[in-house]
């Protein structure tokens, strides 16, 4: 409809325009002298008009001033140490006075001999270049200022050989000349021009190609680097030395032409060969490179929102990292990972190691591009493997890549959420992949506290028991899940406290059935596991859903912070170059994840992991006597080793494993208690010695009785006074703050950690939906089923007596050995029994 209405109007407009178009076409076909003169005069006017239109699309004067200043953001630790500088490239700025005058002479003689005479555009040279180009000999006519414009603003100006690009380049060159003096332009140019091999600026180029500083460059070295400016790759002195030599002599000839060199000097110098001292220059990673890499992403986003440039505005970013703790974490991780590397190297050497006859290593060989190329060339599987096995360099590199032990470490202050130490790998230069935030691995038994926390939130007590018996849990699809431990079932009651201390899988599996996987997943998310997907299935209790180390340490910080989650943060303040505060970042808003009562019960229970359970070497080996709690973790097949330790002021966690999950350590070294725990223990030992962690700090785990418990106790006392009953009431739960106790004697069966109470006081405890307290009358068996499965199963099952509380253990005063020698620690029950022998790794299925 609309088109039909517009069609007549368009026809009328075309009819009016047609005579003018016909007249214009007639003048083009039959030009007159007057018409030619008008056209010739109109071209410059149109060009000028187009140039004026382009001005807003070129860098502003303010941008040009910022580019010259070039003050990268400085990243400082909480104690004022420089962690990193965010530079746009591998460049070190040097003033013109610290650049060899030979370099300046060679540059001006070759690239722009009228540099001091023009104002950004050399019209004579531009016209000459245009004439040569029209005649078929293309030449460049750009001045040093125009080249600087391209180097500083490649995106705004572009690289295409078009009229628009040349006009933008000329406009920007005029602006640069208006802002900078000639020496400043030379200094900026020489500090921004690229020289291949990630070397930007003359200082990095001098170090890369000749092993000297910019002020030490001689005439030949200066001429060689100047010659590269015509085409870095084409005149690369490393791979194209003949071209580079010829181009160097051309530069020397230009220096003679413009009086910077005598003919006699040229005759002598032009006969000398290239003398390179080539070495790639790498940026120093700094003390916290993985942290800095994550911070850079965050800072770029912040700067974009607030109109700042992290490369040139001189921002000073004050972070939460403590450089002393960072140094301790790095040293601890490297030391213990290197010791584990020796174990791995020994396992993979010899006949059953990195050889084609090892089925696992043969699988690695088949996954390489080299194997695919061999097959594409016609080789069958056996021939391809034989061909690759004969290449020692290939086999050595593949073996190193696959069997390199990796680790990650993170420490957070639970009171504020501030990240204090972050080590993403053993060596950032060799392995920039971050095992703190990027790697997702199964957490194993370090996930169990969420199960017990959810149980305590539902009203369970540490003294509640389950029967240590075989467990079969039906899953969707008709499958049966049968979790096991490293010891056979004892068929006796075990308290929740002991089950967590000794990391019993069968007890935890029964507990998650009672609590529900959904509640466990929800609690884990509330506590800090917020980015990874958690599958609400029964096996989640044993840590089958992959998570990051950062999430786990953050969640444990919630446990250490009385059940209150604080989002981890990296930055406290951002300042400008003058020290004025641009932004301050307060602690994140606290979020209640777990009730204080349940959290304190969980924390107290986790003390026993360190005091007498799977993490006992924190006490026995590292001599750490302060109030701490934690949890070990080992995944199926010893693929991943975990340990997280909580102190009132610092929570630290480590992960150890291989980038390829098919590679594992043995049943002994692969356990989290022997792979990850030493890193955390060493770190805490160093931090305590340096008094960076207060050894007097204590967790507040006193639980205030709720209104229901108070009313129940008063009611019970009133009933007893009326009936005159003097029978002993059931043994109360252990007080939350327990004295450290030693592990059971080796002769004791792992399942026999509790003894049955007398028959007269046999009680079956279940959780009540209201207050979650055991319902038991004095001296009689009673069960109140509120829809939850009975904890003990059959009503006839005996309840455990409260174990006696032994005196706090005494620890050796001398410094424990840091060598990874076998210790009598409790074996992490996620893995098979400990064994010092080792068999070559084979593909291991992921499991609980």
Image (cartoon, rainbow, N blue to C red):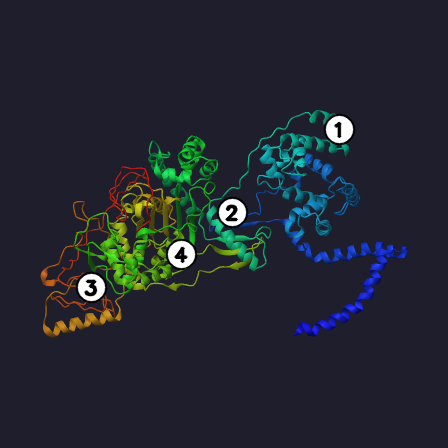
Disc nearer the start of the sequence (1/4): 1
Q: Is residue 358 left or right of residue 318?
A: left
Q: Which mark is residue 540?
A: none
Asked whether the viewer can see residue 628, the reply is: no
Q: CA distance from mark 4 to mark 2?
A: 29 Å
Disc nearer the start of the sequence (3/1): 1
Asked whether the viewer can see residue 283, the reply is: yes
**Element under disc 2:** strand
Q: Tell me if mark 3 has few (under 14), some (14-19) or many (20+) residues whose alpha carbon lies within 10 angstroms of its own.
A: some
1 vs 4, front mark: 4
3 vs 2, front mark: 3
Circle 4 sits on which residue? 532
Q: CA distance from mark 1 to mark 4?
A: 70 Å
The one nearer the camera, 21 or 394, is: 21
The one nearer the camera, 531 or 22, is: 22
Q: Is residue 122 left or right of residue 585?
A: right
Disc nearer the start of the sequence (2/1): 2
2 vs 1, front mark: 1
Q: CA distance from mark 2 to mark 1?
A: 46 Å
Q: Which mark is residue 84?
A: 2
Q: Is residue 289 left or right of residue 459?
A: right
Q: CA distance from mark 4 to mark 3?
A: 33 Å
Q: CA distance from mark 3 to mark 2?
A: 58 Å
- Residue drawn at (83%, 66%) of the image: 19
Q: Tell me if mark 4 has few (under 14), some (14-19) or many (20+) residues whose alpha carbon lies within 10 angstroms of its own.
A: few
Q: Which mark is residue 262?
A: 1
């Amino acid at each position: 409809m609309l088109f039909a209405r517009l069609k007549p109007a368009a026809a009328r407009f075309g009819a009016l325009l047609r005579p003018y178009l016909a007249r214009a076409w007639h003048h083009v076909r039959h030009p007159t002298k007057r018409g030619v003169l008008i056209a010739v005069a109109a071209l410059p006017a149109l060009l000028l008009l187009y140039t004026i239109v382009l001005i807003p699309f070129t860098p502003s004067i303010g941008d040009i001033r910022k580019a010259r200043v070039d003050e990268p953001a400085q990243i400082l630790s909480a104690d004022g140490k420089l962690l990193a500088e965010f530079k746009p490239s591998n460049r070190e700025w040097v003033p013109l006075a610290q650049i060899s005058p030979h370099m300046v002479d060679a540059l001006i003689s070759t690239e722009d001999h009228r540099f001091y005479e023009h104002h950004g555009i050399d019209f004579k040279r531009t016209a000459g270049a245009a004439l040569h180009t029209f005649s078929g000999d293309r030449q460049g006519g750009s001045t040093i200022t125009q080249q600087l414009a391209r180097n500083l603003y490649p995106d705004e100006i572009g690289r295409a050989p078009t009229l628009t690009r040349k006009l933008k380049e000329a406009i920007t060159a005029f602006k640069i000349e208006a802002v900078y003096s000639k020496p400043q332009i030379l200094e900026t140019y020489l500090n921004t021009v690229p020289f291949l091999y990630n070397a930007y600026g003359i200082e990095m180029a001098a170090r890369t190609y000749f092993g000297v500083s910019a002020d030490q460059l001689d005439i030949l070295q200066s001429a060689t680097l100047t010659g590269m400016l015509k085409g870095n790759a084409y005149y690369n002195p490393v791979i194209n030395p003949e071209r580079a030599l010829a181009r160097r002599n051309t530069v020397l000839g230009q220096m003679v032409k413009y009086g910077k060199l005598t003919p006699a000097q040229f005759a002598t110098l032009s006969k000398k060969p290239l003398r390179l001292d080539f070495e790639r220059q790498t940026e120093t990673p700094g003390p916290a490179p993985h942290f800095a890499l994550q911070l850079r992403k965050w800072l770029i986003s912040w700067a974009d929102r607030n109109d700042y440039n992290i490369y040139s505005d001189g921002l000073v970013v004050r972070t939460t990292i403590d450089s002393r703790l960072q140094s301790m974490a790095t040293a601890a991780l490297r030391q213990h990972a290197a010791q584990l590397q020796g174990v791995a190297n020994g396992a993979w050497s010899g006949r059953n190691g990195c050889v084609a006859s090892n089925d696992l290593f043969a699988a690695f060989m088949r996954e390489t591009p080299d194997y695919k190329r061999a097959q594409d060339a016609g080789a069958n599987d056996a021939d391809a493997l034989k061909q690759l096995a004969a290449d020692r360099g290939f086999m050595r590199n593949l073996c190193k890549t696959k069997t390199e032990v990796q680790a990650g470490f993170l420490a957070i202050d639970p009171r504020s959420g501030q990240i204090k130490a972050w080590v993403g790998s053993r060596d950032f230069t060799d392995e920039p992949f971050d095992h703190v935030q990027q790697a997702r691995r199964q957490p194993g038994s370090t996930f169990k506290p969420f199960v017990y926390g959810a149980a305590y939130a539902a009203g369970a007590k540490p003294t509640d028991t389950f029967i240590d018996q075989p467990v079969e849990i039906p899953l969707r699809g008709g499958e049966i899940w049968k979790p096991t431990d490293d010891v056979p079932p004892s068929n006796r009651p075990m308290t929740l406290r002991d089950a967590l201390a000794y990391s019993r899988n069968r007890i935890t599996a029964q507990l998650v059935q009672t609590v529900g996987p959904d509640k466990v997943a929800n609690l884990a998310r509330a506590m800090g596991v917020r980015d990874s997907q958690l599958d609400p299935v029964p096996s989640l209790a044993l840590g089958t859903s992959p998570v990051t180390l950062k999430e786990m340490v953050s969640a444990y910080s919630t446990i250490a912070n009385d059940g209150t989650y604080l989002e981890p943060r990296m930055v406290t303040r951002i300042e400008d170059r003058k020290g004025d505060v641009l932004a301050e970042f307060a602690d994140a808003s606290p979020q209640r994840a777990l009730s204080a009562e349940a959290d304190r019960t969980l924390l107290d229970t986790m003390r026993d992991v360190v005091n007498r359970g799977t993490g006992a070497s924190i006490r026995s080996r590292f001599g750490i006597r302060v109030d701490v709690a934690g949890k070990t973790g080992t995944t199926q097949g010893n693929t991943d080793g975990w340990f997280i330790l909580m102190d009132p002021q610092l929570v630290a966690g480590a992960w150890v494993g291989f980038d390829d999950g098919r590679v594992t350590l043995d049943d002994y070294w692969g356990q989290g208690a022997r792979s990850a725990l030493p890193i955390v223990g060493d770190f805490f030992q160093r931090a305590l010695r340096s008094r960076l962690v207060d050894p007097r700090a204590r967790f507040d785990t006193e639980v205030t009785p709720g209104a229901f418990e108070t009313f129940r106790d008063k009611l019970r006392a009133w009933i007893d006074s009326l009936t005159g009953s003097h029978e002993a009431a059931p043994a109360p739960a252990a007080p939350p703050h327990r004295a450290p106790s030693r592990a059971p004697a080796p002769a004791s069966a792992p399942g026999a950690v509790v003894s049955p109470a007398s028959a007269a006081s046999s009680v079956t405890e279940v959780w009540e939906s209201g207050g979650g307290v055991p319902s038991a009358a004095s001296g009689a068996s009673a069960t109140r089923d509120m829809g939850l499965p009975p904890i003990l199963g059959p009503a006839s099952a005996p309840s455990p007596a409260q174990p006696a509380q032994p005196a706090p253990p005494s620890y050796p005063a001398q410094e424990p050995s840091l060598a990874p020698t076998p210790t009598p620690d409790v074996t992490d029950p996620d893995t098979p029994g400990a064994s010092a022998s080792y068999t070559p790794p084979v593909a291991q299925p992921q499991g609980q």
